[in-house]
Amino acid sequence: MSLQTISLHAQEIDYRRPEFSLADLQGVERSISEWDGKALLINFWATWCIPCKREIPMLNELSLEYQGRDFEVLGIAVDTIENIQKFMQVIPLEYETLADEDKSQDVAFQFSNSFLVLPFTIFLDHQGRIFWMQVEEIHREEIDIILDKIFKIKSGDLPFEQAQLDMVNELEILMQERMAQ
């Protein structure tokens, strides 16, 4: 199945983010609605997941770079708070992270409706619509393409559907370039 087919299927369904609450690392229950009006990169990860750990420095940089721009990185750990706190002694997290080993899996299933493979990254536009989901390690070049389209939706430069199609085309070109190397 091509990226374009996946994108078109998502458009037909008109995915919206699910409603959920999870505890932050201080144990405070946080609702996803707290981020309404902002674009989000939601990254499901765990301390034992090698590709997840490779993504964190880049996600830290992204979070700091986009501060104050109606975009946030939100980590959702499929892990215990204790494991995350130990992990953060080695690699800090510069973005909000929610955690609950069992409930986090349930939230991931609400998004994907099928299975959980980590890392799992979801992009929501400023209206809470699921713009893109990626199962596997994500790279900065991909994120830049995706965020460019999300911000063009917000500015009115592109309608949602066209932005999604343009993004899929650019991601396919990027993938082809990587395979050619």
Image: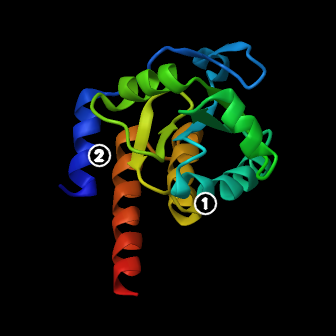
Mark 2 Cα within 10 Å, few/some/many (few <14, many 20+)?
Answer: some
Most extreme residue toward the left, as rendered?
Answer: 1
Which is nearer the N-term, disc 1 or disc 2? 2
Instruction: Classify 10 Å Cα crowding around label 1: few (below 14), some (14-19), many (20 and above).
Output: few
Quadrant of the rendered image containing residue 53: bottom right
Q: Colour scheme of this structure image?
A: rainbow
Query: As shown in the figure, which amino acid type bears the numbered disc 1?
Result: Arg
Q: Residue at x 67, y 58 (%)?
A: 58
Tag 1–tag 2 contact (CB < 8 Å)? no
Give me the disc on residue 91. none
Indicate the secondary structure of the residue bearing disc 2: helix
Residue 111 image point, x, y percent:
39, 28
Residue where numbered disc 2 is placed: 7
* Residue located 62% across and 37% down the image: 75
Q: Secondary structure at mark 1?
A: helix
Percent x, y of residue 137: 48, 57
Residue tagged 1? 54
**In the displayed structure, would residue 50 be above or below residue 157?**
below
- Quick check: can you spot residue 172? yes
Quarter of image, res 57:
bottom right
Q: CA distance from mark 1 to mark 2?
A: 26 Å
Quadrant showing the N terminus? bottom left
